[in-house]
Amino acid sequence: MVEDITGRRGFRTGSAAMEPTIKKGQHFIARMVGADFVPKTGEVILYRPPASWTDPSSQPDTGFRIARIIGAPGNSVSCCDATGKVVVNGRSLSEPYVSAHPASAADFELDVPPGRLWVMGDNRDISADSRYYQDTAEHGTIAVSDVVGVVDTRSS
């Protein structure tokens, strides 16, 4: 991991969970965030997973994971509509970055609690993301405060 003076750090992904956006073994840059971070649906983030999650897709040597924000605090998220798309607040998402369709083989429906996020990898067939931890105390969500950085997908 390398940090520059702008608060951006370089990482290498150890997982194929974000393919095709970020390929396994590829370097990427993340802008580090602080307590004032305001999450936006669609952002790719680097985060610390809850202790209740197992760690199959952590970044090597960091314990972080990478995923896309699908549901921000207060959003209603579900899978899937009649065309196989994820639905957020009643609207089907256009997700050209998803590696396969339907957008998820696992069903889910949740109102994202305040201060929490629903995250999913772009390679939905292998990503160990919010969908796979719905039976935990956090119901598959992560704390906004566990977001470490926002990934610059243009440099990936």
Image (cartoon, rainbow, N blue to C red):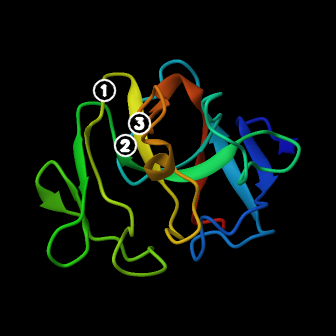
Q: SS class of the residue under badge 2? A: loop
Vertical placement of 48 versus 68: above or below? above
Rendered residue at 31%/59% (across/down): 107
Residue at point 61%, 30% (across, down): 52
- Kind of residue at disc 3: Leu
Could you say whether the residue bearing mark 1 is in a helix, strand or loop? loop
Residue at image coords 69%, 73%: 23
Front residue (pair 136, 126): 136
Task: Say which element carries label 3.
Answer: strand
Q: Is residue 31 left or right of residue 2?
A: left
Q: Which residue is mark 2?
A: 40
Query: Badges 2 and 1: C-beta atoms under 8 Å apart?
Result: no
Residue at the far front: name it: 135
- Find residue 97 and report its horizontal and vertical position in percent: 45, 74
Q: Amino acid at mark 1?
A: Pro
Q: Quadrant of the N terminus?
A: top right
Q: Which residue is mark 3?
A: 117
Classify 10 Å Cα crowding around label 3: few (below 14), some (14-19), many (20 and above).
many
Drawn side of residue 4 relative to residue 32, left or right: right
Quarter of the rendering containing residue 49: top right
Residue 114 percent across, percent down from the top left? 31, 22
Q: Is residue 33 visible?
A: no
Q: Say few, some or many: other residues with alpha carbon within 10 Å of mark 1 (under 14 / 14 to 19 / 20 or more).
A: some
Q: In the drawing, what numbered circle is on residue 113?
A: 1
* Structural distance between the alpha carbons of marks 2 and 1: 15 Å
Horizontally, is 137 left or right of 19 in the view?
Answer: left
Q: Amino acid at mark 2?
A: Lys
Q: Quadrant of the C terminus?
A: bottom right
